[in-house]
Image: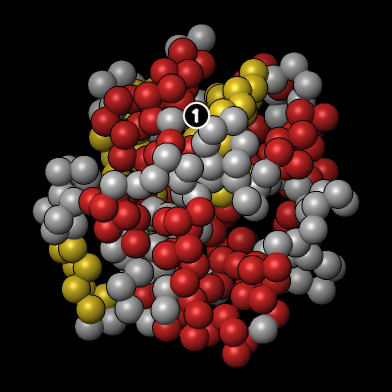
Amino acid sequence: MVEKTFNNKLLSTRGFEDLYPFESNFIDINGHDLHYIDKGEGRPVIMIHGNPTWSFYFRNLIQELSSNFRTIAMDHIGCGFSDKPDVQRYDFTLESRVKDLDTLINSLNINEKINLIVHDWGGMIGLAWAVDHIDRVDKIIITNTSGFLLPETKNFPLMLWLVKYIRFFAVPALLGFNAFARIALLLCSKKGLPKKVKKGLIAPYNSWKNRIATLKFVQDIPIDKSDISFQMVNHVDQHLKDLKECDLMFLWGARDFVFDLTFLNEFRQRFPQAQTHVFHDAGHYLFEDKAKETTDKIKAFLNK
């Protein structure tokens, strides 16, 4: 069982430790502990989560892949069992996230090319790293995410707009009531989540101060050129073409209320020959709705 105290609040895997039975590792990045799982041996597979999840979301993949691969799943700063600094001590931007990922990778003594599995805003983080390190990338599994600026045919969801722009709504809703994580439990899985899984997904966000990352992730989504992360997302947008189409696989939950099929269609326009699997009865938490099906396809793709 893992236990750690953040902002005078104990965070523990008690109650779901059997679902997350992994040894913890930590690396200091600019005075902040970044937590990650590093299990198994073989070709490296790095899993990059989004908001409001953490490495717990990849627990089934870690268990299944670690018998043949070195499976690494990180918790972004402010998430999971990583440190949860305030906004004065950490810059909650895409650039910081990509630098953290790069620092972690460079600390792991990886000599082989790296496989990535990315989800949600972890997709943008992972793809931002990948387009600048093409020679270090093997395969990328892309699930319900983006790698480009908001498509012209997609409206920015109202809930995210309120969080990004309306402070008197965002602060009490996300920090006070943990609304973003709790709503995700209801809307992101179409088969319904077991009680223990729900507990695990929201466990790191158990106090006002421990939820800052869930707010800052949304506020950092770039919509126009005045947003601080606009240029980096535009850079990824322009350089996606540098990725090898045969080394990409798309797995998509069609009933995602944010990263819907509009995003997948944009990817497919750019990579029409890439292997693609759409799960029409799955939502944003694809690895919860379709654990076995997605794991089988990932194994086959990595071994191809």
Q: Is residue 167 above or below residue 49?
A: below
Res. 119 in view: no
Q: Which residue is mark 1?
A: 115
Where residue 56 appears, x then y in whole percent? 32, 48
Question: What residue appears at the point 55 percent right and 72 percent down from the top-left corner?
Answer: 216
Question: What residue appears at the point 31 percent right and 19 percent down from the top-left corner?
Answer: 68
Res. 221 in view: yes
Q: Is residue 111 above or below residue 214?
A: above
- Residue at the right extreme, as displayed: 152
Q: Assign a secondary structure to mark 1.
A: strand
Please tell me which residue lies in front, 252 or 89.
Answer: 252
Question: What residue appears at the point 52 percent right and 36 percent down from the top-left corner?
Answer: 282
Where residue 290 appears, x then y in whole percent? 43, 30
Q: Residues within 10 Å of mark 1 (few under 14, many from 20)?
A: many
- Residue at the bottom extreme, as displayed: 168
Where residue 65 appears, x then y in whole percent? 33, 25
Please tell me which residue lies in front, 224 or 87.
Answer: 224
Identify the image quadrant of residue 199. Answer: bottom left
Where residue 60 appears, x then y in whole percent? 31, 34
